């Protein structure tokens, strides 16, 4: 009889790295965003819209959103795994989270590319 | 030998009412709570972002919503949650690199995280909201 215990190496290592990589991308974006807001001082619609109409900022914002949603997936999934013990409910919450985040990603693209 | 130690019964205290969480512990649970709250508010935040960029009229709507004193207070709270998550996250990245992992530095850095995130919240809050 094979009596294998399912505890291997590298489980979760990829997610651990991605959680940190996305965090760094968002942290850099946060600094850039506040610097731009300080310089532009957007108090009108045109000035505020102008920030995201800029090609670099649009791309950076998009990249930040993608990082955010992946980062959120890992974090919220960890919360469900820590506190929700019934398998069915946990699976349901994970599916709901993933579905919502994919939807938000589409929404974010729509917001940015309508500008 | 290792198994023997693991099997030994250890004293366990999980009574949340009697546990006094040290500052790094408070920082840690706030890091999780702030992340969860920001996640739950994502649809609202995306809606505000969308409205602010859609047209001059919807921009004005967002501006008038943000002008309400209660909304300002909530937004200030959200800015703090974001900045706490941000600063505590940077502390964790440094801990990952084995920077400041001894008890003294860990306690000091958690104090710095609270101080920096609160001061930044006030600076940014005053600049953006008032």
Image: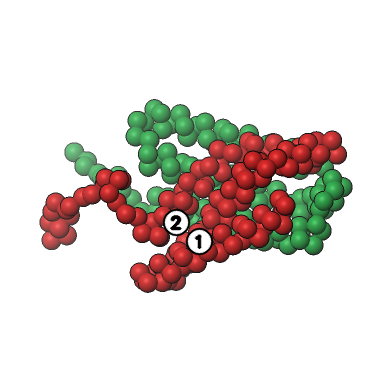
Q: Nearer the viewer, residue A38 or A60?
A: A38
- Quadrant of residue B42 within the rendered picture: top right
What residue is shown at x 13% (from left), y 61% (from top)? Answer: B1
Q: What secondary structure is marked by label 1? A: helix
Q: Is residue B52 above or below residue B118?
A: above
Q: Is residue A47 above or below residue B107?
A: above
User: What colouring does the structure picture have?
Assistant: by chain
> A29 and B36: which one is in front?
B36
Farthest residue to the front: give it. B69
SS type, badge 2: helix
Tag 1 and tag 2, C-beta contact below 8 Å: yes
Q: Which residue is mark 1?
A: B114
What chain does mark 1 sit on?
Answer: B
Q: Which chain is green?
A: A
Q: CA distance from mark 1 to mark 2?
A: 8 Å
Q: Is residue A32 above or below residue A6?
A: below
């Amino acid at each position: 009889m094979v009596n294998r215990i399912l505890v291997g190496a590298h489980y979760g290592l990829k997610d651990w790295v991605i959680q940190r990589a996305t965090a760094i991308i968002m942290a850099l974006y946060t600094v850039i965003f506040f610097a731009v807001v300080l310089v532009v001082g957007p108090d009108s619609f045109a000035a505020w819209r102008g920030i995201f109409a800029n090609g670099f900022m649009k791309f950076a914002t998009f990249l930040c959103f993608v990082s955010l949603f992946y980062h959120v997936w890992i974090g919220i999934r960890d919360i469900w795994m820590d506190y929700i013990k019934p398998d069915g409910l946990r699976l349901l919450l994970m599916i709901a989270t993933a579905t919502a985040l994919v939807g938000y990603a589409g929404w974010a693209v729509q917001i940015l590319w309508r500008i | 030998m290792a198994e023997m130690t693991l099997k030994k019964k250890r004293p366990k205290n999980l009574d949340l009412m009697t546990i006094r969480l040290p500052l790094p512990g408070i920082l840690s649970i706030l890091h999780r709570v702030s992340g969860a709250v920001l996640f739950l508010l994502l649809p609202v935040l995306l809606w505000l972002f969308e409205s602010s960029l859609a047209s001059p009229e919807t921009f004005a709507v967002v501006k008038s919503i943000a002008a309400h004193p209660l909304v300002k207070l909530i937004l200030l709270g959200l800015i703090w949650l974001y900045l706490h998550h941000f600063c505590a996250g940077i502390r964790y990245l440094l801990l990952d690199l084995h920077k400041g992992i001894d008890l003294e530095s860990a306690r000091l850095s958690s104090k710095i995280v609270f101080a920096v995130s609160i001061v930044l919240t006030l600076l940014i809050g005053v600049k953006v909201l008032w």
